[in-house]
Image (spheres, rainbow, N blue to C red):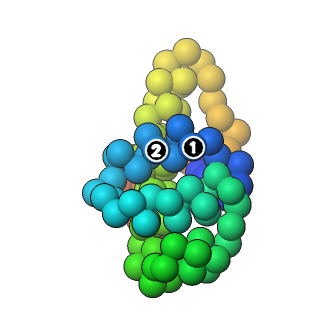
Amino acid sequence: MIKPLVPGHETARKINALISLTDITSDDVKTALHDRYVKGHTQTAAAAINGLDEGNFSRSCVSIELAASKVEICKEEDWSRFGYKSPSLQQHHTCETANKEVAA
């Protein structure tokens, strides 16, 4: 599976929007997600900088990646109505397959 988020190359606005689609409420976790996806820190470093357990932070990363995958699937569905097909998605996806892929 292609990861929908590229650490260090995402905007703060995009990460905030994706966080809003999850159940993440901790300010420390939100800051760590920004450190990871906006600033480009490793997952280990982002957790450490913000005083988080890496295992717990890893689950937050999975949550935001899952949200991003679902958004990408929705975008693909909309784009396909206009004849556009993304080369990054080779197979037909559903939210169920996104859940399985991100969890793997």
Residue at 31% in and 58% down: 25
Pointer 1: what residue?
Answer: 12
Label 1: few (<14), some (14–19) or many (≥20) C-alpha neighbours in 10 Å: some
Give the percent coordinates (x, y) of residue 64: 45, 57
Give the percent coordinates (x, y) of residue 14: 53, 40
| Front-most of residues 45 and 17 | 45
Amino acid type, residue under disc 2 in the picture:
Asn
| Front-most of residues 98 and 9 | 9
Is residue 6 something that shows in the picture?
Answer: no
Residue 53's mark? Answer: none
Q: Is residue 6 left or right of residue 22?
A: right
Pointer 2: what residue?
Answer: 16
Up the image or down, 5 lies above or below 104; here it is above
Marks 2/1: CA–CA distance: 6 Å
Write down the quadrant of residue 89 in the picture. top right
Secondary structure beneath disc 2? helix
Write down the quadrant of residue 42 in the picture. bottom right
Residue at 56% in and 47% down: 91
Q: Are marks 2 and 1 in contact (CB under 8 Å)?
A: yes
Residue at 35% in and 45% down: 20
Residue at 70% in and 60% down: 40
Viewport quadrant of the N terminus: bottom right
Q: Is residue 49 left or right of residue 9?
A: left
Up the image or down, 37 lies above or below 70; here it is below
| Front-most of residues 5 and 31 | 31
Is residue 33 something that shows in the picture?
Answer: yes
Label 2: few (<14), some (14–19) or many (≥20) C-alpha neighbours in 10 Å: some
Q: Is residue 79 left or right of residue 17?
A: right
Give the percent coordinates (x, y) of residue 48: 57, 80
Amino acid type, residue under disc 1 in the picture:
Ala
